[in-house]
Amino acid sequence: MTIFFVRQVGKVVHLVYGKSKQLEEQDSVMDFNFPAQDDPRRIEIREWFKNHPAPSGKQIAERGLAAANWPEPWGLSADPELMLIIEEEFARAGVIMPAVSNPIGVNQCGQSLLTWGTEEMRQELLPPTLSGEYLWCMLFSEPSGGSDLGALRTIARRDGDDFVINGQKIWNSAADRAQIGVVVVRTDSTAPKHKGLTQFVIDMNMPGITVRPIADMTGEENEYNEVFFEDVRVPASRMLGKEGDGWQITMEQLQTERQSMTKPGAVWGSGPSARELMNGLIQTGRIKDPLIRDEAAALYVEGELLRLLSMRHLSNKINGKPAGIEGNVGKMVASPHGQKMTDLAKRSQGVAGMVYNKDVLPLPPKHFGLFDNWDYAYWFSPATTLGVGTQEILKNTIAERVLGLPRDVDPTARVPFNEINKPNVKAA
Amino acid sequence: MTIFFVRQVGKVVHLVYGKSKQLEEQDSVMDFNFPAQDDPRRIEIREWFKNHPAPSGKQIAERGLAAANWPEPWGLSADPELMLIIEEEFARAGVIMPAVSNPIGVNQCGQSLLTWGTEEMRQELLPPTLSGEYLWCMLFSEPSGGSDLGALRTIARRDGDDFVINGQKIWNSAADRAQIGVVVVRTDSTAPKHKGLTQFVIDMNMPGITVRPIADMTGEENEYNEVFFEDVRVPASRMLGKEGDGWQITMEQLQTERQSMTKPGAVWGSGPSARELMNGLIQTGRIKDPLIRDEAAALYVEGELLRLLSMRHLSNKINGKPAGIEGNVGKMVASPHGQKMTDLAKRSQGVAGMVYNKDVLPLPPKHFGLFDNWDYAYWFSPATTLGVGTQEILKNTIAERVLGLPRDVDPTARVPFNEINKPNVKAA
Amino acid sequence: MNFSLSDDHEALRASAQNFLDKEVDLSSLLVPGATVAKSGYDELWEKIAGMGWPGLIIPEAYGGLGMDYIDLVMIIGETGRTLAPAPLFGTLAGSWAILAGGSEEQKAALLGLVAAGETKLAFAIADSGGSYEPGADEVIANASGGEYILTGNRSFVVDAAAADKIIVAASLNGARRYFVVDRAAVAAELLEWRDITRQVASVRLEGAAAELLEGDAASVWPFVRNRLYLLLAAESAAGTQAALTDAVDYAKQRVAFGRPIGAFQAIKHQLAEIAGQAECAGAAVQYAAWTLSVDDPRATLAATMAQSYASEAYCNATYRNIQVFGAIGFTWEMKNHLFYKRARCNAELLGSPRQQREEVVSFLEREAA
Amino acid sequence: MNFSLSDDHEALRASAQNFLDKEVDLSSLLVPGATVAKSGYDELWEKIAGMGWPGLIIPEAYGGLGMDYIDLVMIIGETGRTLAPAPLFGTLAGSWAILAGGSEEQKAALLGLVAAGETKLAFAIADSGGSYEPGADEVIANASGGEYILTGNRSFVVDAAAADKIIVAASLNGARRYFVVDRAAVAAELLEWRDITRQVASVRLEGAAAELLEGDAASVWPFVRNRLYLLLAAESAAGTQAALTDAVDYAKQRVAFGRPIGAFQAIKHQLAEIAGQAECAGAAVQYAAWTLSVDDPRATLAATMAQSYASEAYCNATYRNIQVFGAIGFTWEMKNHLFYKRARCNAELLGSPRQQREEVVSFLEREAA
């Protein structure tokens, strides 16, 4: 193998080619192969699964596998490559990962407890979270807010050692099943809208909390809820970070969530991908239609590229590189990619697809979660460019934060929140 | 034939059906047929062409056919149906209409002289315009302005009976060939940007005017020019309207120009349409490619609908209906329609189309103007969503003026023009 | 030449609008599990019949109003705009089949009842795969004494459940013919059709007694298909406009970041594009209606173009409508999804827009040859 | 597992960037009527040869640098980003053909000269219709004594004019074989290729003396095609990023209505979409380069995917780039159109993106079977 040196000669850069055994052994070149089957770390994990063929949540958590990238005692301080091994071995053992069954708890809220929580909160809340006993939800959006999350109106008023919460949240995934959650509320109405926000950890069975599932256009109530707060008393000790940290913590959680959606699955990274679409079209012979064929090929290519983006994200972590722009860009590409996929799957069915009919295209026996049929995924798909920030907000974010284009004007951003609706601000 | 009456009974509207011979004879129903071949007005025009097989511009103008919709003595006060007959008879006689060979002169500037000019200007300028002796140009855009036309910087300073013009215009069609033109300049820098503008009619051979053709990406210099003004003295008598009317006159001229572009031709309504595209693909057998076939069909349909929009526009005029939204909407649809057509024509050629090669698809022996081959139309096509207002400006206009959505913020719109670049305005 | 709607057309449209705005109430559908049967499908029909609409396209000679297709699309546009849940589609389809394929006596006998509002129809021609052409899955007709016996299945039959009589395409001695069957003689099973504003069923015939339509069978499907294209396209064009208007209204009211969301170019430009498509779809429908009214040689082309364009425009507009509304537009309790599903189903019921584009090219190839 | 560029790769890319930013000057092309010959095509080549790039992919055994495909795309990305006008394409294509189809002796003899910068190559395989497969318009080879004589035409031969030797696909006894011909033995006619940063010719052989490549002929075109896909895709991915960066920079500076035009959502969102495509195109190229480097069984698929995706992304980005610039971006004196034309020509030179998508599906069908 040949490598190269770069040498400065005056102002001109020349390349000189030559061999370097040392660098050759470092194997620093790109390598799209997965960790080997005989990797000793893999063998160790596989051995554990052999001894625990149907592990309980508690066993998984105690072995450090629920959030292996976390530091001890919660995790194994695993590097991303070990994380990949663990993910593969969970799949091999047919066990669903806690990060998949309780993503909000492990990936978003648990991580926030590590970063922003007190030691007391961690000791109390992390064990049941990692064992799967506590399912979490995030209570952010409000009916009046929508994309303008910072305009939220739910208020928490200090009263002795408690805060008293009043208001309403909406579009809350898993709120009907969660035992616990994080809520972002306004604790200071005299501060600008993004400044006066604070996050609390709340028990969902606290008095004054009412959860109402929302039926969406699929006819199901699988995804969204409304959550009403009427004089809900939460102890000040359940505050995450300190007063006013709410916006930053919320943005971190959403960014983590969006990054996790850079995957080729049809619905927010979950569900079947273009590989399954292509196989289904091949198996049914529908791939022979020249128009379907070209569309399916384009989607297959795009899906493979999304897969590469997600792997590159992981790889950058492994190699200690800063996170690239893939998190935002990936979701921007992935959501319409999923919509186009489900639409093609449905169109390949013709008029028969207009009847409730799960038998669109065959899928392999694999865990696709809720979206284990193209029919449901299709009728759900308009939500994928709305959830976790609309496609428009996402494009704005990419244009402003990644490309450095000027920010949109928000006349309400810098005035005290309780003055926003006064006429002079509205006119701005 | 059955017609109906509408009768109010209390607050409920009922329909009662019955016959009415009277209304039947009115023939008020929709009718997509063209004026008949034996229409007496058509026969009269056809007769004239028989006696004038190769009419001079002067003969055409004197017969009133150069701008037949204008009032006497310039035109025939023709209604739009007669206009349609005249257009068809010009085509039948193989004579190019003055409105086609000199569109800026007849459609935009001539019309402005009728509306805004003095009687003296009309007597002097209209005869040579209608006879084709005077080719016109419009001098609006500037290097610094672009889409923000109102920000133009060319200044006209009053000096006795003259105005003295200094500045630069750009993207001026036909300026290199025109004898005469209209120019919009700033006569009052203390007024807000749209208020201090005035139009003048200028002779293009006036001292101080320099015209430089611009080579565009086709490699040709057919379309655009730069025009430089250095102390150009224009008599105050050449002012169109009065001082400060410039913005309104310019907008009228541009609106007229955009309306004329709601046509199925590939480039701003000119050139071959999807009918020719389809016929070319059929003749060459390329229509058998299933992907080309589907695309060509979609374009054919869209082209026919553009044809209908332009005919409906004419029909509304015939029937005394107010102009609909077709003018703006039509150009918004027509420009990308043309780009898609030229792109498909080019792609149907494969790699051979990457060589200068006019022989893309066969065209019938018909007058397609400059764009009488798909190759040139393709390489020109990126301009069609830029000229006469970018696609983005056009969509803004439709959203704001047609749909009534809120207007974009322009912090420079209401301040005196000469204060725009002061720091406080920039920060707004 | 007159491409403009006359005042008469506008008045007809306005009166249909007034009637339907008053009578149509979609709220009972905005509860999960709702079906069109519970939304007053039959009650609305009674009122529609009272307006004489069942006889709109039936010639005066048979007791109908004999209106032309431009009149028709004025009314269908309004039923499409309001998603009026009523079995009008089936009756129109069946009437056209009888008009094209019935003898004089059959037309007089059957269409008179329809025009009087006494008989509702449906038209059963698609097989279980959604094909409208003869195929393996054909209903078989056998002569038996003076009448005919039909056996087989039809699917995607709009308004079969509500109909009194169903016109069924079947194979008699290997050739496709059309038969009239009493609704009571067939088993209709409602499909879980995603567009719950419309009732669609599969139909099972097991030795059902049938009357043969005695006229020209070859003309029936082209005649009916062109008119159904027009009907769906008219619904879709009006629905496109309705979805646009709805989104524009919402974008003017909903505030984010200190401004109505309609002030943001991302929203404005998307809605401007829909406005362009709505305008084109409307023109396509009116032109197709005119060509059918005057029996223009390009009527088939015009109707096919209208259906391919309008159904795609409707899909785009209803998708964009939901995106402008945001998550609230994705809920069952809002009516946005009813339009989304109507749009999607309109684009499949008679074959996809691509299929219609294929028909367009085939027409033009024949014309060029 | 390592999907990230190493510091070595970054350093290689950076040094190519430094070199080309200094050496490439497109200004002579921004005059109507300009041709690449007047822009220092040959002069730049001399400097490139001095850098050792002609031997980049030639194994060390034949005197080259034996770098892998990830190294290659670092450099090709930079030649694509700068539209470096130099006959590198032809030499790489010819080298690959010899690597795949030459005997050991031929490789040693021919590739040594190339690696030393003493011989430029071109690869002639397309017929006048742009087909790369054997067809009616084939060059015919006849044995004549100890050598071969070629007669016929080839078209779309990149760098034929600049080459010293041309590798020509021809039919010998009905089978496709590959031959080495001296440039002096053929008549090359420059095509009026729209992308004036590249020199493309048609080639006429009238009894030209030729040397037969003695190795495995069947592997030549698949081997070369995959690598040319990678080469064009690498140019296109880098060009996409360049067109994006250029448009972003302009949008930050150009002011309209009191704001930089990049503050308007219509511009922002379009550029965000291009950013997504640029990211995907880059990933596609790196993956394809890796698969070719390790001779992965999916290398053909990866290279084909990269070419289909990257060339369309490049077309989109350069179109959008011109739209962001406005009319000035449409003029010949700006370099925007050079990128637009490079993008368009890259999407046709080896067949359209659709053709590559067809190859993708065929590959997957074979894999599934």
Image (cartoon, coloured by chain):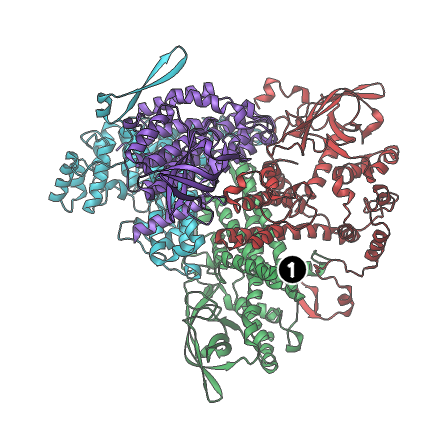
Chain colours: A cyan, B red, C green, D purple
Answer left or right for C347 relative to D116.
Answer: right
Q: Residue at x 54, y 68 (%)?
A: C45
Q: Please state which amino acid type lies under the numbered disc 1.
A: Arg
Near-viewer residue (D251 or C87):
D251
Give the letter of the chain under mark 1.
C
| Quarter assignment of residue D52 | top left
Residue farthest bottom in this picture? C145
Q: Residue at x 49, y 61 (%)?
A: C351
Q: Nearer the viewer, residue D105 or D76?
A: D105
Number of marks drawn? 1
Which secondary structure, mark 1?
helix
Instruction: Name the residue carrying label 1.
Output: C13
Res D139 visible: yes
Using the image, determine if residue A325 lies above or below residue C323.
Answer: above
When the figure is inspected, residue C195 is found, relative to residue D246, above or below; the finding is: below
- Residue C147, position as x, y percentages in the image: 48, 86
**Which quadrant is the C terminus of chain C positioned in?**
bottom right
Residue D8 location, x and y as percent?
A: 31, 23
Q: Residue at position x 83%, y 40% from top?
A: B131
Q: Is residue B264 left or right of residue A167?
A: right
Q: Is residue C149 above or below residue D143?
A: below
- Figure quadrant of residue C59: bottom right
**Relative depth, front residue between A99 and C256:** A99
Question: Dot 1: within a 10 Å radius of its alpha carbon, few (fewer than 14), some, or many (20 or more) residues?
Answer: many
Residue A101 on image: x %, y %: 26, 44
Observer able to see residue C78: no
Q: Position of residue A422 (x, y in %)?
A: 55, 31
Q: Is residue A302 left or right of residue B232?
A: left
Q: Residue furthest top?
A: A10
Screen quadrant of the N terminus of chain C: bottom right
